[in-house]
Image (cartoon, rainbow, N blue to C red):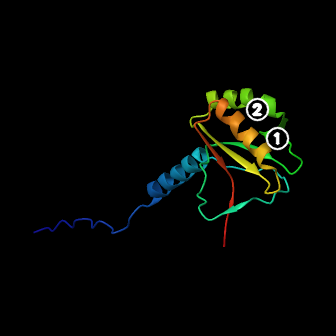
């Protein structure tokens, strides 16, 4: 009698497809992530105990110590802010605006900026603060 020997399957596990999938997922998340970068303004943000993290999709409006207003690193006059916000709201998926300001700005100037943002179509307008420690 002749015995036919069966080939034994090796217990190796091929991880090449797994590595491919991991790299594809890594590329997907890297491309779909939005990176938020702040302007290089020397600002001392006001502090608050009730501060929460802002949305990354919010339109950012900067108000420096001299009272200058910026959107997308471009200087804007306060009276032009409403139309610029309206343009940003058409493109943006969220209707949020985040005002990043210095703590030495007069309250009236901040109120004018917030008011123009709301008139431009923003549903939520927040002011960036630092958490009190």
> In whole angstroms, how far apart are the C-alphas of marks 1 and 2?
8 Å
What is the number of callouts on the image? 2
Task: Identify residue for label 2.
Answer: 81
Q: Earlier in the sequence, mark 1 or mark 2?
A: 1
- In the rendered image, which quarter contains the C terminus? bottom right
- Quadrant for residue 83, please give it: top right
In this picture, residue 1 sits left or right of residue 97: left
Q: Residues within 10 Å of mark 2 (few under 14, many from 20)?
A: many
Q: Residue at x 67, y 31 (%)?
A: 88
Task: Assign a secondary structure to mark 1.
Answer: strand
Residue 69 has which mark? 1
> Which of the pair 107/128 is nearer the observer?
107
Q: Residue 118, percent across and down? A: 65, 34
Q: Residue furthest bottom?
A: 133
Q: Residue at x 85, y 57 (%)?
A: 42
Q: Residue at x 33, y 68 (%)?
A: 10
* Any part of residue 73 in sight: no
Q: Residue furthest right?
A: 66
Q: Are marks 1 and 2 in contact (CB under 8 Å)?
A: yes
Q: Residue 57, percent across and down? A: 61, 43
Q: Residues within 10 Å of mark 1 (few under 14, many from 20)?
A: many
Q: Is residue 107 above or below residue 93?
A: below
């Amino acid at each position: 009698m002749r015995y036919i020997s069966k080939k034994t399957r090796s217990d190796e596990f091929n991880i090449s497809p797994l590595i491919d999938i991991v790299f594809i997922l890594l590329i997907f998340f890297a491309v779909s992530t939005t990176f938020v970068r702040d302007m290089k303004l020397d600002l001392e943000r006001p502090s608050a105990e009730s501060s929460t993290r802002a949305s990354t999709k919010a339109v950012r409006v900067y108000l420096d110590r001299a009272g200058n207003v910026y959107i997308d690193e471009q200087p804007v006059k306060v009276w032009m802010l409403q139309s610029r916000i309206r343009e940003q709201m058409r493109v943006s998926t969220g209707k949020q605006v985040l005002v990043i300001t210095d703590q030495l700005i007069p309250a009236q100037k901040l109120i004018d900026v917030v008011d123009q943002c709301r008139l431009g179509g923003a549903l939520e307008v927040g002011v960036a603060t630092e958490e009190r420690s």
